[in-house]
Image: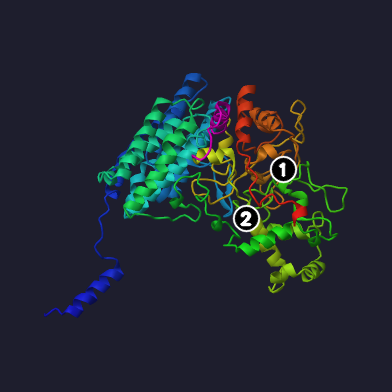
Amino acid sequence: MKISAGMIVWSFCLAMAAGFTRSKPDIGVPVALAYFKTNAEVFASATGELQQSIDKLDDDPASVIKARLALKNTRLQYKKIAFFLEYFFKSAALIYNSAPKYEIEEPYMEYREPTGFQVIESLLYEAHPATKKLELLQQADVVTSSAKDLNALLYGFTANDKQLLESIQLELVRVITLSITGFDAPLLKTGIAESEMSLRALQTVLQPFREKATKTGVEVANYLSGGIAWLHQHPDFDSFDRLHFLTNYALPLQRSLQVFIKELQLQLNTTHVLNYEAGDLFNPAFLNLIAFLGADSSAQWQIGLGRRLFFDPGLSGNNKISCATCHQPEKHFTDGLTTSNAFDGHSHVPRNAPSLFYSAFQYRQFWDGKAESLQSQVKTVLFNVQEMNADSLALVKHLQQDTTYSKLMGAASPIDQIARCIAAYVRSLNPRSSRFDDYIQGKGPALSEDEIKGFNLFMGQAQCGTCHFAPLFNGLTPPLYDRTEFEVPGITRTDDLLHPVADTDMGRYPLFPMDYYKQAFKTPTVRNTAATAPYMHNGAFKTLEAVIEFYNQGGAAGLKLPIPNQTLSPLPLHLTPNEAASIVSFIHTLDDAEPTGLFIKKSNQ
């Protein structure tokens, strides 16, 4: 049959549509698959050894030590394949490395049963692990039986180099925010060794790409090998210099890797929140604000109008209260009170007014997360009888009398427009102008030795960074930053730790009556806390020193109060007074400088 030019063109078009066009072959995926197959078998063997050690567990302390060592080895073997599992087989990864307590993921409300290594760890570190042998064997059986079938996941599996490289980028975020903080293994304290295993895995999988030996490829190789060496030479969890590791290896590696991927033309971003183009985690643009619920690309006029509305007492039912009454800019958008004054002028609202800085970077608003967006929060406050107690008709009339608000009156719902504009203003309160930000971005003077020590303690032994995640140091959970974390810290009614009394606020439980939501609260940011006392949802703690000592003693459960669902470990942190003081010094470096036009006082409106 004679083949015409038209038929050739048509065949080419069909091939294009079917995805059969010739492209560069994937060079990394075959290496990654071979690596995964080999190390999945090693991991499966390690889970078997863990199961055997648990089966031999008894009252002999030596048997407990052997079981803990077997768990450590199993975790190290898991970290060799974690980047691959976490990205391509998320459900399988959750079997091994999910939280040790019941957990609800916000905003998705997905129920998750505790399974895996973290559950085993918590049981092995109880006072008498042998009494938990049945539970331990059940957990070991789950991970062992699943690990035996890991390679079966690859049946019919397809992937490309773009996906592989994104899995590596996400693993770097895990190392920076979770592994070196001890998030996965707070009692074993294997986070540094696990970080080394993760970077070694990335080193192997990146090798085919680095064979081109571009300048950036060499940089990636150097930062990887340097980071691995630093981790290997300094394996002790408590004394590890995290700030040195971040500034000299991990963050430069993030930046170089992004450039290298771009040079390879293999960029891919399947996340809603992360902006890989920003380079590293601490770049203010790394988290995409528009990705959060209720956010939009607010026009400048909306932010300006929202600022005016924020300070306008005419929105309230008595023409005396504005948003700024409880969120005063000169006090970093707090009011300095234990709990804010109520509308009637003599009583108080139930909870402390937190700072509005960085509040847009959350999936739920209020301490109990009852509002799904800033807009919803604004409307709730406006019409709450204890807060602004607005009247809708009077509110609209007030808007009509001020020509500044003419744009609002053109909308179908002026109240919705008020909420959008105030939310737009609050969304702009993300200065990232602290001394720590300047330093970590290479733009400011070095931190003092005491402040560096405080950062390393915060992100390590003190375990602050396992709830207050970098870079915003709030409950926005890495590596995808796609959920807001609620914790049961077990707060006391006052900061008198010698005579502790349990707080009775049920937190999120009245909204969703599930046991693990009793006394659960959203994790706020630590940024600007040095300037925003008092602390906690009830404003019970007057100083940062008191807060740190509370956690140092293991929270309410550590103080022997009946908080059975406390998510914070009840074990003491054993921080010395000097170490606690160093943490306070670091927290002071997170206070934002006064940005021009942000701390606008009421008199200027």
Q: Can you see residue 576?
A: no
Residue 10 at x, y percent in the picture: 23, 77
Residue 447 position by quadrant: top right
Q: Which residue is mark 1?
A: 537
Q: Is residue 448 magenta?
A: yes
Left or right: residue 303 compared with residue 453: right
Residue at horizontal 58%, vertical 54%?
Answer: 107
* Image disc number at residue 427: 2
First in sequence, mark 1 or 2: give its number: 2
Rendered location of residue 219, percent (x, y): 34, 40
For the C terminus, the quadrant is bottom right
Q: Which mark is residue 61?
A: none
Q: Position of residue 568 (x, y in %)?
A: 62, 35
The answer to which image quadrant residue 8 occupies is bottom left
Nearer-the-camera pick, 356 or 404: 404
Q: Which residue is depicted at the point 74% across and 51% down?
A: 601
Give the answer, above or below, for where 369 lies relative to 172: below
Q: Report whether 158 appears left or right of 593.
A: left
